[in-house]
Amino acid sequence: MFSKILIANRGEIAVRIIRACKEMGIATVAVFSEADRDALHVSLADESICIGPARVQDSYLNMAAILSAAVSTNAQAIHPGYGLLSENARFAELCEKCNITFIGPSARLISLLGDKDQAKRTMREAGVPVVPGCDLVPDAETARREAERIGFPLLVKARSGGGGRGIRLVTKLEDVEAAFLASSAEAQSAFGDGACYMERFLRPVKHIEMQVLCDKMGHVVCLGERDCSIQRKNQKLLEESPSPFVTAEMRAKMMEAAAAVAKAVQYENVGTIEFLVDQERNFYFMEMNTRLQVEHPVTELVTGIDLVKWQIRTAAGLPLPFRQEDIVFNGCSIECRINAEDPSNQFAPSCGRISLLHIPDGPWVRFDTALYQDYLVPPYYDSLLGKLIVCAQTREEAIRKMRAALCELVIEGVAHTADLHLDILETPEFRAGTYTTDFMEKRGS
């Protein structure tokens, strides 16, 4: 087992990883930008090193600075959290060259599954259903020809990256060329890779993801699903497990497909297979995320398995002591992402000093955050302030518990989305569990 780990991230996920390491008796090194000098993860870690100015390109994406910090502090491993460098194959490769363990899958796996076109071909070969579409499109003329074959509506999608960038919806043939060129240009700018493919646009759909945990000995365990269908501009807002839409029979089939994906590529560490599910409950592989998900706590609460600790253990080469038949799902869990955004002003980002903070408490209520009173929320980074998570025996109880927790949560000094979540919980679509990925769009958000 590692004796010291560097956390190459910030905010609530850095705090979450430090907490897991403390419980495991592992020393931690925090890295921080000049804007994060007073951040909570900096004071909680055993050691901390400034790696650059506020801009992420100069600090949290500065591979040389992060690796230098790991070498100088004798850290044996680097945990990348989510976002930033967590799915960067080059960074994973550099860690290996520096004899530092990257806590995640290998650079080979990150490259394979980060290439969404190649990933889909791999899934087809493994017998996993994929959304009808085409492979990489070399030019606009080919895009027009393939679009006629696929049919409308369709999506032009970037091979690399994520976060909704490099994606264009096309409803008619005459718009294909412009959409293809725009997606390619955006992807080239954001990810350094302008390659795009196309697939049929399915709607209305559910966005259901399956969590897998795999060790280096080839053991694969699927920890069930999360319903991530409430999104705004392809960014998740609320997640729950289990999904109210997924039947027991469907769950078994999706878990089997998720395990088949992991085994097909000889996956290691934690990963998430994302599926689109139509109204007839047909499911299609969308992509695989080779990292810890923001919404991992809902899975932890219904399974009792600490995913961060098992990330660390499997990266260290320890075998999973449990098998699929040992996994028991208990209760229902809901997570609300509390973002520093103003829903009343077109979700404009908000920053400022936290003048008053009260965090809800009680049985099976959890708030993953890096906030503290008088903390200055900087304007340079992701808007996530924290994740409010609850768990209860039934979904109705979980909804009531979440409503109570949201009402108790007090964050003054910045605009945030807690009231928006209260509104979502009261809608008939959410109550019935029938909401789909266009839920927020229908609400005009």
Image (cartoon, rainbow, N blue to C red):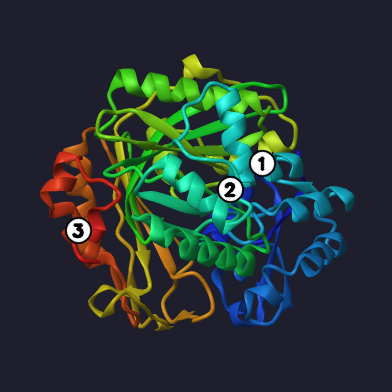
**Upstream in sequence: badge 3 or badge 1:** 1
Q: Can you identify the residue that label 1 sits on?
A: 312
**Upstream in sequence: badge 3 or badge 2:** 2
Residue 411 lies in what quarter of the image?
bottom left
Q: Can you identify the residue that label 2 sits on?
A: 20
Task: Give the secondary structure at mark 3.
Answer: helix
- The amino acid at mark 1 is Ile
**Upstream in sequence: badge 2 or badge 1:** 2
Q: Is residue 107 above or below residue 5?
A: above
- The amino acid at mark 2 is Ala
- For the point 33% across and 64% down, which residue is it? 359
- Tell me if mark 3 has few (under 14), some (14-19) or many (20+) residues whose alpha carbon lies within 10 angstroms of its own: few
Q: Tell me whether the residue at label 3 lies in contact with that at label 1, contact meaning CB atoms closer than 8 angstroms.
A: no
Q: Is residue 390 above or below residue 392?
A: below
The percent position of residue 80, horizontal first and vertical second, equals 65, 55
In front: mark 2 or mark 1? Answer: 1
- The amino acid at mark 3 is Lys
Task: Give the secondary structure at mark 1.
Answer: helix
Query: How far is mark 3 from mark 1, CA to CA?
Result: 41 Å
Residue placed furthest toward the top: 325
Query: How far is mark 3 from mark 2, CA to CA?
Result: 40 Å
Task: Answer left or right for 361 relative to 285.
Answer: left
Tally of numbered discs = 3
- Tell me if mark 1 has few (under 14), some (14-19) or many (20+) residues whose alpha carbon lies within 10 angstroms of its own: many
On residue 442, which mark appears? 3
